[in-house]
Image (cartoon, rainbow, N blue to C red):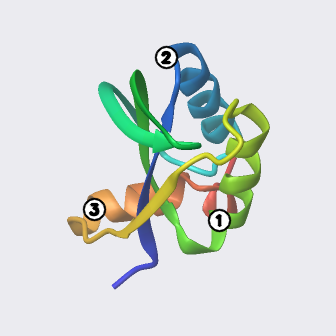
């Protein structure tokens, strides 16, 4: 078993989602990013909103969560970025590649 977790966070535009992905990759806080467009319907400050957004999803280790949150908050334009975490169970070799790609385990 490992300490891999996944997370996802939505951004209001593709450019900001890409910016966050590059920052997280360069700092070796994630091994890979997936960015997908989606529609979001939500209530904010008493109003129903309907927006086109982009979700960044990635895998990391639990120990890197606070650094990831700090980096996301520096590029995210929203007051409260919705970051969701979930446990990851992965095939052994893929899990090992992910772990080896991260900051605390990188040989670079």
Disc number placed over residue 29 in the picture, else none: none
The answer to whether residue 33 is seen in the rendering is no
Classed neighbour count for the residue bearing mark 3: other residues with Cα under 10 Å, few (<14), some (14–19), many (≥20): few
Residue that label 2 marks: 14
Q: Are marks 3 and 2 in contact (CB under 8 Å)?
A: no
Q: Nearer the viewer, residue 100 or 18?
A: 18
Left or right: where 71 falls relative to 42: right
Q: Residue furthest bottom?
A: 1
Q: Quadrant of residue 92?
A: bottom left
Residue that label 3 marks: 93
As helix, strand or loop, the secondary structure at mark 1 comes to helix
Mark toward the start of the polypeptide (3 vs 2): 2
Kindly report which numbered mark, 3 or 2, lies closer to the viewer in this rendering: 2
Q: Quadrant of residue 36?
A: top left
- Measuring from the top left, give residue 74's x and y in whole percent: 79, 38
The answer to whether residue 66 is seen in the rendering is yes
Kindly report which numbered mark, 2 or 1, lies closer to the viewer in this rendering: 2
Q: Quadrant of residue 19?
A: top right
Where's the N terminus, which quadrant?
Answer: bottom left
- Measuring from the top left, give residue 27's x and y in whole percent: 71, 43
* 3 to 83, vertically: above or below: below
Q: Are marks 3 and 1 in contact (CB under 8 Å)?
A: no
Residue that label 1 marks: 64
Residue at 29% of width from left, 57% of height from top? 94
Residue at 42% of width from left, 67% of height from top? 5
Classed neighbour count for the residue bearing mark 2: other residues with Cα under 10 Å, few (<14), some (14–19), many (≥20): some
Q: Residue furthest left?
A: 91
């Amino acid at each position: 078993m490992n300490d891999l977790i996944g997370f996802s966070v939505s951004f209001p535009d593709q450019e900001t989602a890409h910016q966050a992905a590059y920052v997280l990759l360069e700092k070796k806080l994630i091994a890979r990013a997936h960015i997908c467009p989606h529609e979001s319907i939500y209530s904010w400050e008493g109003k129903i909103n309907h927006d086109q957004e982009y979700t960044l999803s990635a895998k990391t280790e639990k120990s890197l969560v606070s650094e990831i949150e700090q980096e996301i908050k520096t590029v995210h334009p929203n007051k409260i970025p919705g970051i969701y975490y979930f446990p990851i169970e992965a095939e052994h070799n893929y899990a090992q590649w992910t772990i080896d790609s991260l900051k605390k385990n990188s040989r670079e």
